[in-house]
Image (tube, helix red, strand yellow):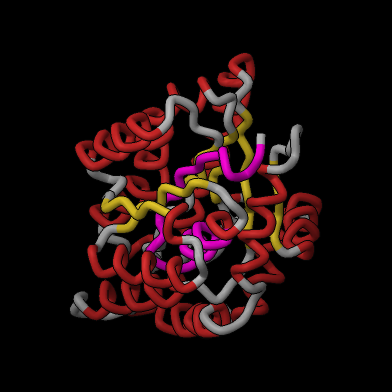
Amino acid sequence: MSASSKTIVITGCSTGFGRVTALHLARQGWRVFATVRKHSDRESLLAEAAAQGAAERLTPVICDITQAEDVRNLAQIVAAETPQLNALLNNAGTAYPGPLELMPLDDLRAQFELNVIAQMGVTQALLPVLKAGRGTIINVSSIGGRIASVINGPYCASKFALEALSDTLRLEVAPFGVRVVVIEPGASPTAIWETGRKRGLAGLARRAGGAGDYAPLVAAVEKFYARSATHGFPPERFAETVLEILNTPRPRARYTLPRRVAWMIRLRHLAPDWLWDWGLRRALKW
């Protein structure tokens, strides 16, 4: 099957990995349904696709994946266009950073609602056409889905959960010819880090005592956010990895980006907990 006859749904295409990948696949001839949350993002994505000669192959869909009605509408739009879906890239996500002691439980719930529950909602809605197309589901996890880190506890927990659901789903849908793949990226200059930093600071600012005893730790992690917002691997590599997975008849269960992430995960699993904790606390001066 040529790329021009293949169809993919990508969530979270307003910025970052989702936007870059939607444009990249459209340029490669894929029919792309790209979800965005705002009309302004829809218009800017269409304008960028037109400038790259790919507008006719890209359809932005206004969809808040945490809203069941929006997800049903997305599934209806896709089913009306094609009886067989070749791929789904569950990319939408966000971060709610902060010390766990100070984390509002509503924020913790919102973290799981978007990064876990909504992912499965989209997957369930599109599985009938994915099964018909013997398609590929790609779930975007993170190095944080394999290695927990301070201040990012809610985000890491949500990605750990997504990893477990992906492992289960991979086994359950295999008899239908559907593949499930997880991508575990490290730091990259996308909007999620800056958005998370601002959200975390805003949350702490609402507290009478601010970050309290955790202020030095928050400051140290903020420096990491600042670096991640401007450094790391380019988002284009993520898009290229997605295309590689889609062009592979039997893709691996997991792909890490960049290569050093795989070594960090291996090191974490080999190191005793006490040694890992000691090294991390020393690095953070905590």
Q: Position of residue 229 (x, y in %)?
A: 51, 80
Task: Please identify the residue farthest to the top as the structure is shown.
Answer: 175
Q: Is residue 253 visible?
A: yes
271 relative to 219 in the view: left or right? right
Front position in the image: 68 or 201: 68
Where is residue 134, by image quadrant?
top right
* Residue 253 in the image: above or below residue 210: above
Q: Is residue 24 above or below residue 197?
A: above
Left or right relative to 210: residue 223:
right
Which residues make up the magenta segment? Answer: 2-24
Instruction: Identify which residue is drawn at 59% across, 72% down.
Output: 188
* Residue 230, horizontal then vertical, whole percent: 56, 84
Image quadrant assignment for residue 79 = top left
Residue under the point 36% across and 47% down: 112
Who is closer to the viewer here, 30 or 124? 30
Q: Nearer the viewer, residue 144 or 251?
A: 251
4 drawn magenta: yes
